Image (spheres, grey):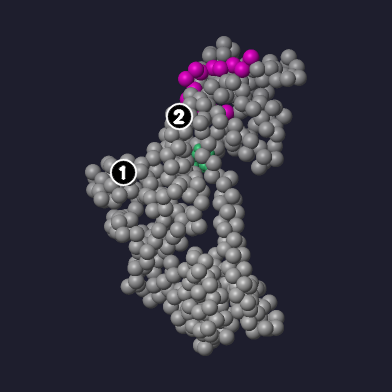
Amino acid sequence: MSIWIVDDETNLAGGLKKAFEKKGYSVKCIPTIHELQEALNTEIPSLVFLDQCLPDGNGLDMLPIILKIAPRCRVVMMTAFGDSSLVVRAIRQGAYNYLDKPFPLDAAMNMVTRAFESIRLQNQAEVMMADESNLLLGSSPAMEKVSETLSKLAPYQDVTVLLTGESGTGKEVAARMIHRASNCQGEFVAVNCSAIPEALLEAELFGYAKGAYTGADSNKPGLIEVADKGTLFLDEIGDLPLSLQTKLFRFIDQRTIRPLGSTKEKKISLKLICATCLDLEKKVREESFRKDLYFRISVIPIKLPPLRERGKDILELASYFLGDCSKRMNRPLPELTEEVQEVFLSYPWPGNVRELRNMIERILILRSQADSLVRLADLPMEMLDAHPVGLVPESRVVAPGASLNDTIDRVERELITAALAKCGGNRTQAAAELGISRFSLIRRMQRHGLE
Ligand SMILES: Nc1ncnc2c1ncn2[C@@H]1O[C@H](COP(=O)(O)OP(=O)(O)OP(=O)(O)O)[C@@H](O)[C@H]1O
């Protein structure tokens, strides 16, 4: 948390510096706009006391520039007493607050406390907003072990973690959970290494200095720097180009970065969480992934198990998504029949938790809302197809208040759906399976809207 005092009045700046440093803050005094611009090239402040009248220009002109480079920075304008039009302009342009000169030390100290509290609250609110998709649900032994390991990482700021597991197993959710548990001041920054073109990725990660190449007309902090004091999540690390693997290795080794075209090294402290669905050891053997980098990032490896190996977690997750989706869609919350639960437990879920979530959403959209149960007939064919038991009538389940005819209708629909699924949609075979003629099957399918 660094405070900058941008003012050429040395007495005032020196007094504030001493008082703030006493409270443990790191403070920098900057007397001119030119020097402020220089400083912004290398560092991002948390709080700036910015004087309006500076020897080389109007401090207010620097307000949007500071906020562009450091959007979370709080800027307190120091203005001449009674200049209310300037105060209005400053606040409109995003200043956090203002102090009329001369002001007592207490007023500045108060401002510091409030500004840092507002940054803390902003971070907290962002974490809470992201929390919706941040729950790592599951109480199976495999997931309890994962959660236990994740929680142990919280106190270590410079730790490096490798999350592995099939696509959709919750690697990003786990990374966010580590970050949230750390309660650190910095941000959670996620980068998908396979989504950004190689030519851009270096500048995105490491940043660049003004003039580093044509078009670089200002300094741009890289995402590693943005994640300083927080967490950098490098998703699909296996797809990181070899040239950048070398640079990343150097960063992990020395914990410093040098933006493109800059001569200055910057010290960075962050949690580095890498994730991959690929077999990195195989990539090392194939020489498409650096061995030294692999050893560096795999000090703490955590494997997210595939959903099919999490037993009853499948039902726990399904019921969570049912609740979540019903709420979002403003629909009544249905329950899964026992048969559907059986299918869920035996289905292999190749797309893991993501597939389960999407499946629940699809079921909720397509099913009849009048029914309080999600039945086999509501499941997609491919799911029933994969179910080893084949026909699973739900005749045991009688909907409360349903008439005999309704129940017979429902059971018939379920049996037909299951038979068709078992026979891969082949009507002749399904009819034989059900012991009726093909014609009778088609007539019944039409009646049930299955055509
Ligand atoms: N244990 C879990 N509890 C709750 N939701 C989860 C869990 N695991 C995954 N999800 C949900 O599943 C979806 C996929 O999760 P996530 O993006 O974290 O997976 P991933 O392993 O990072 O996938 P990929 O490798 O494809 O990037 C998200 O919607 C996430 O909210």
Q: Residue at coordinates 59% horizontally, 35% vertically from top-left?
A: 320
Percent of width and height locating residue 303: 39, 38
The number of numbered discs placed on residues in the rendered structure image is: 2
Q: Residue at coordinates 68% horizontally, 77% vertically from top-left?
A: 88
Can residue 168 be seen here? The reply is: no
Tell me if residue 387 is in the magenta stretch.
Answer: yes
Can residue 435 be seen here? The reply is: yes
State the mark number for residue 97.
none
Given the image, on which type of amino acid does mark 1 rest? Leu
Q: Residue at coordinates 55% horizontally, 45% vertically from top-left?
A: 133
Most distant residue in the top direction:
435
Quarter assignment of residue 224: bottom left
Viewer-closest of 285 and 389 = 285
Q: Which residue is mark 1?
A: 280
Ligand 1 within 8 Å of the CB at mark 1: no
State the mark number for residue 141.
2
Percent of width and height locating residue 119: 57, 61
Viewer-closest of 247 and 446 = 247
Percent of width and height locating residue 20: 52, 70
Quarter assignment of residue 153: top left
Return the disc, 1 or 2, that comes first in the chain's sequence: 2
Tell me if residue 437 is in the magenta stretch.
Answer: no
Given the image, on which type of amino acid does mark 2 rest? Pro
Q: Which span of residues is magenta-colored?
A: 379-396
Q: Residue at coordinates 43% horizontally, 73% vertically from top-left?
A: 41
Separation (CA) of disc 1 from disc 2: 25 Å
Viewer-closest of 23 and 190 = 23
**Looking at the image, is 232 positioned above or below residue 89?**
above
Ligand 1 within 8 Å of the CB at mark 2: no
| Left or right: residue 181 compared with residue 115 | left
Question: Badge 2: how crowded within 10 Å, few (<14), some, or many (20+)?
Answer: few
Secondary structure at badge 2 equals helix
